[in-house]
Structure formats: structure tokens, C-alpha cells
Amino acid sequence: MSFKLTFLGKEKVFEKKVKLHELIDNKDRSIICARVNNRLRELTYEVSDDAKIEFLDVHDGDAVRIYEASLRYVVAMAFSRVYPDLEIRFAYNVSRSVFIQVLNPGIHVNPTMVAKVKEEMDKIIAADYPLIREKYTTQEAVKIYNENNLFDKLDALQFRPEKTIHLYECNGYYNYMFSRMVPSTGYLKKFVLFYYSPGMILQYPRAEAGGEIPQFEDAPTFGKTLKESHEWAKIAGADTVVGINKHIHRDGIVDFIQLCEARHNRMLAELGERIISDSNIRLICIAGPSSSGKTTFANRLRVELLSRGLKPIRISLDDYYLPKSQAPLDEDGKPDLESIEALDIELFNKNMLDLINGEEVQLPKFDFKLGKRVPGRNLKVGLDEPIIIEGIHALNDRMTALIPRHQKYKIFIAPQAQINLDNTNPISITDLRLLRRLVRDYKFRGASAEETISMWPSVRRGEFKWIYDTQEGADYVYNSMLSYELCVMKKYALPLLQNVDVESEYYPVAERLIRMLKYFEDMPDEWVPCNSLMKEFIGGSCYEGA
């Protein structure tokens, strides 16, 4: 029976099934994968029914994820050849890169080691070995993992609901990266590997960088936070999905929740101590990417400072929006409300300066129904009343250019997750925030998963443009990650993701998130404190409406 395929601007009828890579001339290996009726497929996938096919290169985020996962596979394969006794671990790191560390006690990564791994990777890529996907029973997978010293993957198997598993074989090497893969190692010629104490950094092409490898930009503040996050998670036994699940079974739900919340309480106490000890601080600026928990954090910080004798005043940057007619336009010609130019920067600066100088100010109030500002409250602040501002532009010096630096305390907030499914598969920090937003947008706005996923690329563009560059100038980075949160969010997020139609253009994202969530044990949320940052997303916060 014949079938029709639409691809590369043409339609063609076929009489027998055909593999995707047979449809294109891909000698330069620039095409990484394809969407077939909006489902993400490897180039080795066979098509036998009518389909619309979109071929993807590294200008596409889904293709980049496949490229990056395949590259991690090659790194692990290279280590297995030149350093077979070493156990390595991958983690997402600064400058949109992957950090590789050696876990063996007493073994220190050095430039010579990096050079040997890089040389072996080059050999593997030049050989263009095929990556062959095969299905195995769980028992067969256990045998393969034991034979290949992949012991970290054995523990994760007990939490896999399916009775079968896919593994990729490449010239006698086996591994699984929880991802689709490129057809062969020859597709992975673009990468950078270099020494970065105490490990090495792997860079790869990024969609937001036009398919190129971005220039590495060190970020000491961000890097330090990631390191602290990993150290705490390791001490708490919560640096892997297996460790988190074992906490639930071994220590009980209440203890695990309280363990994670205690860390947030300790960071808040540390912040309170820092702020109270500096009498110069008049403006507390809080910023972070979407779904970082800024609102709950600002409320909890206010209470922390109240307990120390200060009387913080909260002022919303939202009240300084210009009318939509005056907002700048984005690339689609729509009002760009994430741009700093959408705010009345001059008025905000003047109001903050007048308040700090002891003058009474009538603040604006943005009426979102009218789409314009109206007169707000009159306010005068004392020396014991620091002003808290929170928003995506709160750390941008343009917003507070009239305020001396020593009078400002800058806080960057984001979930800095350092959780792995196993040693070679880190969980994306961005995916964690997307899950938070999915759950919150449905709970409070009735938005479907497809609606939230559709807006996410625009949100991310705004973050790269306006937020991430400000984190290195922060006085404090607050890690809003709660190690138990994926167990709690699972029951809220899975039904939303499972409702995404398999032919939807957003299904590949939903499928990726489902594949990750299924490894986490379910956890009831009845013991989550009402002031927990988690409540901002699942509902029931004592700060709702505050």
C-alpha cells in the first residue's frame, strides 16, 4: 500500500517503508533528527504511513538535546577505553556547558587526562561507528550493566515502571542516555573539551547561539552555587533520583520534607544576618528566571527581617509598566512586556531615591483592566524600613541607577538543581522550572500544558536577554531547589503532560518530561509547610493573596 510523505517543500509517494536518513542528502551530517507528524524521531526511524516530516539541525532545541546526549555517550565511551577503572559523573554547569568529574577517591583530573579523553573521542568520531538501539528485558539489561561496570544504572532500574529497556550499542560499548541519539558517532564533530578544575568542561552547539558553540564565559558566583548545591545534595543523599526515592522509603516523608525545608530556613537566616549587619542597605533587589519562587521568597525574607527588628516595605515593579501602546515591540510585532523598556525607568528611579531620602511619595498602581497606571498609595519610609523590590529587572542597574551601590543588596534566586538520574544523565535545571510553571499555570490560570509549553521559548529568550547576565553581580544567590519537589509535582504534572496529543507540536517536550518524571516516587503534599516555596506552584500557600 502506497503512502505520501511531505518533506523539504515537496510531496513524494512511496511503495515501501523508508528510513528518514534515506530521504535526504546529509553528507555534512548537519541534520540531526526529524519531527514526523510532530513526533521527534531518530534518522534511522522507518516511515510507512502518510506523514509530514521536518528535518532538524542544531538550530533547533530538540536536535541540540539529542546532540548533547549523544556527545555525553561518546565521552563515557572514551573514558571506558582509556580510563576503564574511573567512574565519572556529568552535571550541567556554567556557560551552558556540561561538567565532568571523576568520582574515584584520590584521583585528580589534570590536563593530560583531558587530552587523552579528547584524543580518544576524536578517534571514535572519525571512525563513524553506528549507534544501534536495541530493546532488552530488565534482566538482560542488568547483565549488560554488570558486564560494563555501569553499576550506577542498576539502582535506577528498580524505579523504572516498564519491564523492558532500550540500550545503545556502539562498537561493543553499551549505555543509555534517556534520549534519542544520532545515527552514528560521525555526527558529533562539533565540541570543545577542556580542563576546568576539579574536572573538565564539555561544550556543544546551542540553538540560542545560532547552532554554534558559544564562547565560554566563566561565572564564579553561579559556579560556586552549583558546587554548594551538589555538596549539600551529596551530604543529604539527594543527588540522584535513587537517593531521593530511598529517602522516602527509608526516612519517611516528613523527615525528608523537613530536611529540605531546613536548608531554605538556614539560607534565609544567613541572609537576615547579612542584611541586618549592614546599616547602609536601603534597597533589597530580588530577581531570577521564571518559576524560581520569587514571590514566596520575598514574603519569607520580609518575615525573616521583621523577626530581626526591621520593617521591610514591598514595592512591585509591575506598577511601573508603561501603557501597552508605549511598550517596545518584540520580533513578532507584539508588545514586549519582558523588556526593561516596557517599564517607566525614570519614574522608578526618582521614586526610590525620594523614598530613601525620607520624602513622601505617591506610588503608581498599574490597573491591568484599564491597561494604564492610576494613583496608588502614599508612602514614606524610615531608616528601619528597607524597600524590597522583586521582578525580572530588579538587579538591572538601570532600574536603580540613582541609588548608590552600597545602599543596594542584590539577591539572585533560581533552583540550582544538581540531581542525576544516574552518573551520565543529569536533570535539566530548565526542565525543573518548566514543570513548576506547568503546574502553577494550570492551578491558578487554568492553562493547559500545551499553552505553557508554547510560551516557554519566548520566556527563555527573555531570560537570556535580561536576567542571566545580572546574576554575577548579586550579593547572594538563593538556591530555591527543594530536593523532594519532583516527587510532589509528579501527580500534578503527569496528567497535564499525558493530555498533550501525540500529534501536537508540543508532544516532544511533554514526552521528555514524562520520561524523566516516571522515575520519581509519588509523595503526598499534606506535610509540605504552608509557607514553603513549593506551595507557590501547587497551591495552598499562606501567602496567597498577600
Image (cartoon, rainbow, N blue to C red):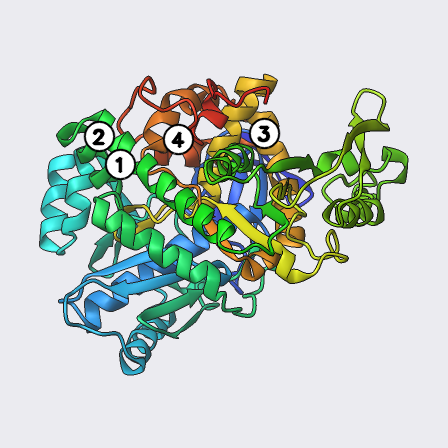
Q: Quadrant of residue 371?
A: top right
Instruction: Give the image location of residue 126, x and y in percent.
Output: 38, 72
Instruction: Give the image location of residue 489, x and y in percent.
Output: 39, 26
Give the side of residue 293 with respect to residue 364, left or right: left
Return the residue at label 3: 452
Return the residue at label 2: 255
* Amino acid type, label 1: Leu
Q: Is residue 43 visible?
A: no
**Classed neighbour count for the residue bearing mark 2: other residues with Cα under 10 Å, few (<14), some (14–19), many (≥20):** some
Return the residue at label 4: 514
Of pointers 1 and 3, the one earlier in the residue sequence:
1
Outermost residue to the bottom: 112
Residue 356 image label: none
Return the residue at label 1: 259
The quarter of the picture where the C terminus appears is top right
Give the side of residue 92 with respect to residue 349, left or right: left
* Amino acid type, label 4: Ile
